[in-house]
Amino acid sequence: MFRKHVPLMPCRAVGAHERCSVDMIPPDIAPMTPELDQISSLSNLLATVEQLSLSSSQLDGVPTDLDSSLRFAGAQLTQAAGLLLRLPQEIIAQAIVILYRFYVGSEGGSFRINAVKDVSAASLYMTAKVSFLPQSTRSILNVYAYLLSPACPLRKPPQTSTKPDPESYYLSEGSYQAARATLLQTESILLRSISFITQVTLPHHLALYYLQTLGVLTPASTPKSTALAARTLAHLNTALLSPQLVYLTHQPPALAVASVYLAAKEVGIKLASVEWWEVFDVDREELGFLVVALRSCEAWIQAEKVRWRDGSCPLTLDELETEIKKKDGECL
């Protein structure tokens, strides 16, 4: 029998834009008083060592490698849904970080209790709701119905060149009402688990600001400086898929500095000769770790593609149970 998870992280005072108040939170998940650095507009709440070392899913019998694959699949699913909904990358990235927050730690969510497809939809719906581009439940569920259907290339590589059957991802009225109830219920569970902390500060705008500060990105931009900025943002977007969960372990300034440093090396632009990263409060050790993590992302993503080349990572509870039984059978 699986365990019932409890809220994960301490909570700050919730802003009016989140449409809730601290008084609405039940006593058993009352927030702790936040530290000053927890409510900074340039910082995020980070996961602890204990939360990173053991997840609720692992306690429920999900193997460690499958746990990482499910996170990767959830991030991929969220990214694809956001693109189909024509949402900006900022909203998509925030939704992916919230999805990671939900599943981290022994008191977080479990893949065997809350399907990754449901949490992905809820995180994207919730993130878009408080943005300037809110999405209706109908739009969210129509997109996820397609992404979870056999017609979607994300699920299985297309075997033939025939057009997909629209009926395979048609959402009837009855199916829509059931899916809508699941979406709203999952959103409620997600909010309670992350203690209603929906703020996610991204490093993308900081990275561009750092490039301007270093004198690389100027109004009279060159092809190399434009390529540097594009490569920097590409590293930050790829880092959302990192198995090291760098968005949960490092603050935005450190991620921005590491992406600028690595992109400059790849493009061939020489930055300041001094240890410029210390100006942005990042030490050499943290910079080195993040550069290695960013460089390793591509190889890990390719390994995941090879692992699931004959199928797709389980996104529903039934698919997950089948995969776990299959792995248990291989171990016998």
Image: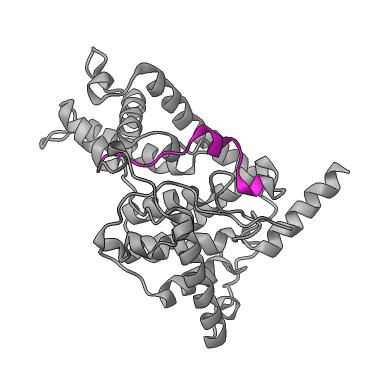
Residue 42, quarter of the rendered image: top left
Image location (x, y in percent) of residue 155: 60, 60
Does 307 appear above or below 214?
A: below
Residue 49 within the segment the image draws in magenta: yes
Image location (x, y in percent) of residue 231: 33, 36
Visible in this render: residue 116?
yes
Does 70 appear above or below 138?
A: above
- What colour scheme has been applied to the protein in the rendered image? one colour
Name the quarter where the N terminus is drawn: bottom right
Number of disc labels: 0
Name the quarter where the C terminus is drawn: top right
Residue found at x 58% / y 66%: 148
Image location (x, y in percent) of residue 328: 81, 48
Does 248 appear above or below 263?
A: below
| Of residues 226 and 332, the one drawn nearer to the viewer in this rendering | 332
Image location (x, y in percent) of residue 172: 54, 85
Residue found at x 31% / y 45%: 201
Visible in this render: residue 270?
no
Furthest residue in direction front, as rendered: 27
Residue 291 within the segment the image draws in magenta: no
Furthest residue in direction left, as rendered: 219
Q: Is residue 300 left or right of residue 127?
A: right
Furthest residue in direction bottom, as rendered: 173
Instruction: Tell me where the magenta segment starts and ends, as one range.
Output: 41-58
Residue found at x 84% / y 42%: 331
Q: Is residue 209 left or right of residue 92?
A: left
| Of residues 36 and 291, the one drawn nearer to the viewer in this rendering | 36
Furthest residue in direction top, as rendered: 274
Residue found at x 37% / y 65%: 24
Q: Is residue 126 left or right of residue 70?
A: left
